[in-house]
């Protein structure tokens, strides 16, 4: 089973289709008039489909158990075909396309089972996903942003060579997978003035995104928030809250972190935890959706010109 613990929870929707073809118009009339010996075909099949959606993970080994928030099953009878359309919704870490297709399949199979005594030419066809929404496919459309990115590691031990940097490197690696190139990577000690000067230099170079890792805890040398907050023109509390909330679901120590996010001019500055796991989880928590900010900023600046 695929690991989805790093994913964020979003609303997911999927719609699937199945088509049942019958051998005679008499079969269609029997379905419409509810005279099929085994019962009301459309309603029995609908019930079977609802059970199937909720029990997909019990039938398909790699499907995750997930909360089904909504299921709708619709029929469209076209001459000698019954078109089944099923929509499934959830608010979870993974999508529901398999659940929708599983439900459509079972609806079609139930119809087949109920109709076979009166029609030997029943056929199931075209089980497919019509569309889905939510998750990475909707929030990872950033290929045209062409952002100028810098990563700053704020750490006494890394700066002095006593410790190897892992947090900054994993941030750069995760950004690369999103199509972002980290053009500058630098290490500074936990000193307010040096950190501020480094950030200012990157802002003067018109960096779009500056990510700082380290110094967001509560030890005497953790002064990154004290350095960054006075520099910001606009803080973005929602991103800060999302980072802490995501971390809190994974470790109770996340509440001790003081991540800071905001704009200085058009440069987005993000101060993230210095631990490897904290830095990694912070990126997972808000990327790629946070990149939508740059579409807003760049679009606004383009309109002004």
Image: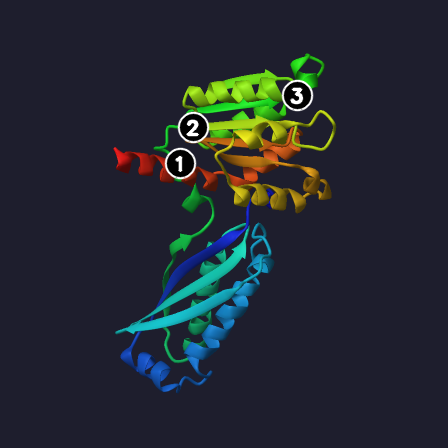
Residue 221 vs residue 252, the one in the foreground: 221
**Separation of marks 1 and 3 at Cα, in angstroms:** 29 Å
Q: Of the residues under marks 1 and 2, which one precedes in the sequence?
A: 2
155 to the left or right of 129: right
Q: Nearer the viewer, residue 155 or 1?
A: 155
Q: Residue at x 72, y 14 (%)?
A: 162
Mark 3, residue position: 190
Relative image position of residue 77 (x, y in whole percent): 31, 74
Q: Earlier in the sequence, mark 1 or mark 3?
A: 3
Going by the picture, which residue comes out furthest to the front?
230
Residue indicated by mark 2: 208
Q: Distance between the Cα atoms at labels 1 and 2?
A: 8 Å
Q: Nearer the viewer, mark 1 or mark 3?
A: 3
Residue at (66, 27) in percent of width and height: 223
What residue does disc 1 label? 294
Image quarter of the C terminus: top left
| Secondary structure type for disc 3 | loop
């Amino acid at each position: 089973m695929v690991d989805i613990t790093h994913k964020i929870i979003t609303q997911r929707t999927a719609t699937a289709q199945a088509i049942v073809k019958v051998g005679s118009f008499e079969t269609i009339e029997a379905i419409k008039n509810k005279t099929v010996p085994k019962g009301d075909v459309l309603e029995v099949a609908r019930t079977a489909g609802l059970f199937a959606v909720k029990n997909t993970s019990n039938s398909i080994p790699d499907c995750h158990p997930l909360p089904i928030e909504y299921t709708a099953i619709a029929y469209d009878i076209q001459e000698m075909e019954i078109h089944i359309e099923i929509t499934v919704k959830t608010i979870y870490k993974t999508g529901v396309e398999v659940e929708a297709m599983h439900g459509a399949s079972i609806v079609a199979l139930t119809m087949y089972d109920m109709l076979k005594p009166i029609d030997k030419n029943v056929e199931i066809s075209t089980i497919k996903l019509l569309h889905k929404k939510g998750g990475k496919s909707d929030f990872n459309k950033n290929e045209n942003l062409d952002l100028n990115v810098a990563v700053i590691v704020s750490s006494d031990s890394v700066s002095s060579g006593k410790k190897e940097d892992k947090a900054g490197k994993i941030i750069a690696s995760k950004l690369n997978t999103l199509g972002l190139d980290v053009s500058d990577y630098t290490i500074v000690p936990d000193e307010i003035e040096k950190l501020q000067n480094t950030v200012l230099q990157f802002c003067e170079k018109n960096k779009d995104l500056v990510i700082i890792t380290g110094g967001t805890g509560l030890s005497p040398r953790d002064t990154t928030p004290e350095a960054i907050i006075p520099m910001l023109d606009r803080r973005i509390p929602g991103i800060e809250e999302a980072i802490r909330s995501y971390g809190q679901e994974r470790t109770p120590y996340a509440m001790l972190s003081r991540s800071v996010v905001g704009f200085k001019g058009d440069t987005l500055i993000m101060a993230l935890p210095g631990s490897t796991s904290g830095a990694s989880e912070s990126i997972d928590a808000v990327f790629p959706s946070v990149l939508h900010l740059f579409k807003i900023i760049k679009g606004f600046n383009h309109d002004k010109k």
